[in-house]
Amino acid sequence: MKPTSILRYITASVCIATTLAISVTTNKDDVEGFFAKSKSQSGHTNNWAVLVCTSRFWFNYRHIANTLSMYRTVKRLGIPDSNIIMMLADDVACNSRNIFPATVYNNRGRHLDLYGENVEVDYRGYEVTVENFIRLLTGRVAKETPRSKRLMTDDQSNILIFMTGHGGEEFLKFQDAEEISAYDLGDAFQQMYEKKRYNEILFMIDTCQANTMYTQIHSPNILATGSSKLNESSYSHHDDPDIGVAVIDRFTYYILEVLEKVNMQSKATLKDLFDTYDYNLLQSTPGVRDDLFDRPLDEVLLTDFFGNVQNVELTESKEVNNSLTEADPALVDSDPMFIEDPQAETTSSLKQSVPWSQEQSHTFEIGNPDQSQTWRFVAFAVLSVAMGGALFAGSSLV
């Protein structure tokens, strides 16, 4: 083969390989950029909440109210009912002792009916058992179990697990009939990790000696917090003389006081929440265990667990919504017991703006093929000119 032909062959091969490399890299950047926009900073793409009241009977009214209060909050912040599993004895609203039938309140003024008209209880009455709870977490449910009773999570799911009831050192009672131990809970979380059923978990428990319930957790990416340490009780916040029992616990009350100041665009973090813990208010020693958790608490948004990932594809440049430039609502004082309809609030927030954590800037839009094609055409034209020049120069040299 003549030297001229060899030089031309080598030059053409290099140019073609470069062109293909640029095209493939651009495609990869497009795809990765698209999926990156669908993820939050924590890497999760969906949120779930498991809310468990392990008590029954009228005198445990406050535990029902704790759970329903948390249910209302996560719905307001965007987690849909399809991603909320609630286990509730549900024997209070229609109890014969309830002088306000079909209602549950968490405040003495009875400003907000937690039971309302849109509450979905997934496990009710005697379905609230240790076995069902562990099967729910680990995915070992019967084949005939409906979707509403399944925790359909994956390795990109952030899960809030909230539990309330009566407990002791490393155990939590279920309806005064059985107990779940800290070892049972730790084993269930380990199974979830091995089966890739979560990205991160926030485990929150309000009960006596609550902090002992997370001592046997050893799986990664689990953050835990409880209302009281070993040998301490957790207390109710206040009662309603007309109802005749306590209507909410202190730990849950003061958590809600923070969460009611948060909306779906809030920049408030878990550190902000944990910094509000005060023994003088709670009358017990709350705890936080973060040694298994990878991210710094001041970088973990409250909405990473109490809210929902909102996937929004921007199709054109628009002025950033004014609500994103206003002061963080988490810094504004608010009474947690005076809140508008959560459904109306959620709908309004969704229509007004994109969540602040949503990725706003990117180089290529996979939904905008013209942009990518233009860059590929320019790159191809430049390389074609370069290739022609190289061939001409090679011929001249030979």
Image (spheres, rainbow, N blue to C red):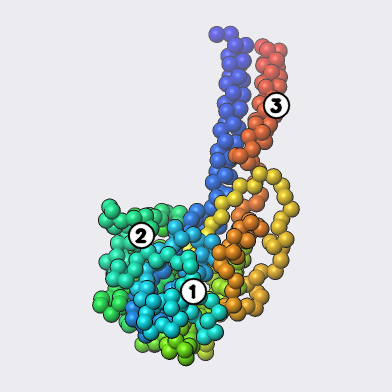
Type of amino acid under label 1: Leu
**x and y percentages locating residue 341 in the rendered image:** 57, 69
The residues tagged by marks 3 and 1 sit, at their Cα atoms, a distance apart of 66 Å
Between circles 3 and 1, the one closer to the viewer is 1
User: Mark 3 = which residue?
Assistant: 382
Locate the N terminus by quadrant.
top right
- Residue 109's spot in the image, x, y percent? 54, 84
Disc 2: which residue: 149
Closer mark to the observer between disc 2 and disc 1: 1
Q: Earlier in the sequence, mark 2 or mark 1?
A: 1
| Mark pair 3, 2: CA separation | 59 Å
**In the image, residue 154 lies at what x, y percent?**
41, 53
Q: Give the amino acid type for the residue marked by disc 3 in the picture.
A: Val
94 or 218, nearer to the observer: 94
The answer for how far apart the CA atoms under marks 2 and 1 are is 22 Å
Q: Which mark is residue 114?
A: 1
